[in-house]
Amino acid sequence: MIEAKGLTKHYGSKLAVNQLSFSVRPGVVTGFLGPNGAGKSTTMRMIVGLDAPDAGDVTVNGRHYHDLPWPLHEVGALLEAKAIHPGRSARAHLQMLAESNHIGLKRVDEVLEVVGLSAVARQRAGKFSLGMSQRLGIAATLLGNPEVMLFDEPVNGLDPDGIRWVRNLLRGLAREGRTIFVSSHLMSEMALTADEVVIIGRGCLIAQIPIDQLLAQSSQRYVRVRSPELAALKTALELAGATTVLEEDGSLSVRGPDEIAIGELAASIPVVLHELAPQSASLEEAFMELTEDSIEYHGGSGTAPVQSPEGAK
């Protein structure tokens, strides 16, 4: 289990993390979400003792990381895929970690097999692609068979098959009762991987919530309705305070009342319904709704002006 209480970290005048408190439970995959610059990487670095908080505290299974006698046996972390000596082979990199943490060399070969790098184990890591480096970083995270694992953007550089492999790996580890904490900007993938999420913005906690609950409470949730008497139903719904949008496919998107209220209203008119289907918001929609005020750098709307050849002289 990971417990953070009031974590605060400054870099000069920049407040990176601001009184952040959350917990990561064993047996579930907990996603760590936030806009760029929200403080996710800084928080992960404080968990494993690479950065010291200015205030607050964070523990792993009730102890500080620097108090763990053999850290890799209790905590595995993938924070930077390319943090590997480029002249070492994949096997030599893992062997060095194993020997420094009293881990048998048999385990090195086991994790190389798990991540699919056995065939390139003697190649220099400096020549690895980003995807191969990610796999090597995951192997290092698994090396000590720890109960707590942190992954910062673990699917960067992986192809679709690799992304699916990571998803299944993380969910499998959680089913074994391990504590899994993972950050990602790929919302569609996080929706398939995580059971709950910790969402931060500008270094502050916005929410810690199960994903299904987050999607259910989003204002982007709506009900899709089809009827041969759609105009009459649309008028009645709007009189009752609903917001409706007539879609290009001929369906009606209704926000406000749930499917039960819509069905009862249709029966009272009466209007025949051909479809009455609640539609959940996507994780991306729910995330953007919560973090809109916390985004530090917004992209502009529209396209950049194109300069004519004459103006470029």
Image (spheres, helix red, strand yellow):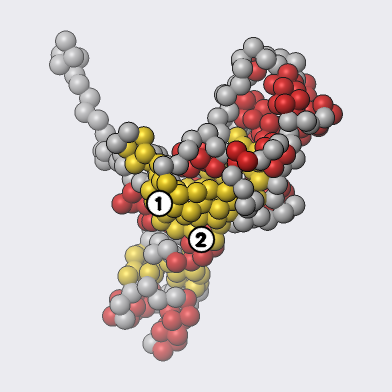
- Confirm or deny contact between disc 1 and disc 2 (CB under 8 A): no
- Which residue carries the number 1 mark? 19
Please rate how many residues cluster around mark 1, counting C-alpha atoms within 10 Å: few if below 14, some from 14 to 19, many from 20. some
Label 1 element class: strand
Question: Residue 205: percent from the left, percent from the top?
Answer: 42, 54
Image coordinates of residue 170 in percent, x first then y, are: 67, 45
- Percent x, y for residue 63? 62, 48
Q: Is residue 86 left or right of residue 298?
A: right
Say which residue appears at 45% left-offset and 58% top-offset: 207
Q: Which residue shows up at 65% across the image and 18% down it?
A: 125
Q: Is residue 199 or residue 290 the one in the foreground?
A: 199
Place residue 258 in its image quadrant: bottom left
Q: Is residue 188 above or below residue 87?
A: below
Q: Is residue 298 left or right of residue 98?
A: left
What's the residue at 57%, 24% (across, down)? 83
Quadrant of the snapshot with the C terminus: top left
Residue 29 in sight: no
**Vertical position of residue 143 compared to residue 195: above or below:** above
Q: Which residue is mark 2?
A: 209
